[in-house]
Image: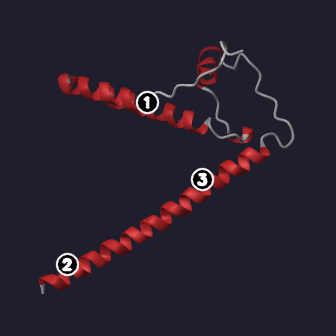
Amino acid sequence: ERYTKKTTILLPIHSMTLFFSAVTLVEKPSLLPSYIFGSIAWLLIAVMGFRHNNPDPWDQPKTFRDIVEILLVGEPLEPPPTITKNQNKKEASAYRKKWADKIKELEKNSVEEKRRAVREAREGAAAEE
C-alpha cells in the first residue's frame, strides 16, 4: 500500500504556456494573428476546465472529447452520465456558497478600496491648497 500511494502534482500549465507564447511572440511577431486565435481557443478550454470543477452534475459542460466526437461522428460515442437524485447536493451547495461568499468579499473590498481612493484624493487636493 505504501508503494501505490497516489500523489497529485499541480503544475502551472496556463502560466507556462503564456510565458512560452510571449517569448516566441517577441522573437517572431509575425505569429501575432495565429496567437490571437489560439488564445481565444485556449481561453475557452480553460473556462471549460474551470466549469468542470463544479461538483453539481447539472452544471457540468460537455467534455472536450464529447465535442470532438460530435464534430467527427455526429454524436458522442459514450452515453451521457446518469445523474442520481440529490447527487453531490452537499458539495454543490458548499461550492455555490463558497463562490457567493467570495463575490461578497470582493465587492466589499472594492467598495472599501474606492472609498480609500476618494479619501486619499480629497486629502491630496486639500494638501495642495
Residue 21 placed where, x, y %? 31, 26
Q: Secondary structure at mark 2?
A: helix
Q: To which residue does mark 2 refer?
A: 124
Residue 105 placed where, x, y %? 52, 62
Q: To which residue does mark 1 refer?
A: 12
Exactly how many numbered labels are in the figure? Answer: 3
N-terminal label among 2 and 3: 3
Q: Amino acid at mark 3?
A: Trp
Is 51 drawn above or below residue 25 in the view shown? below
Residue name at image x 31 percent, y 78 percent? 119
Q: Residues within 10 Å of mark 2 (few under 14, many from 20)?
A: few
Task: Name, please, the residue furthest toward the left.
Answer: 129
Task: Name, please, the residue furthest toward the top.
Answer: 3
| Location of the N terminus (image quadrant) | top right
Give the CA separation, mark 2 to mark 1: 41 Å
Residue name at image x 63 percent, y 17 percent? 69
Left or right placement of residue 40 versus residue 25 in this view: right
N-terminal label among 2 and 1: 1
Q: Amino acid at mark 2?
A: Gly
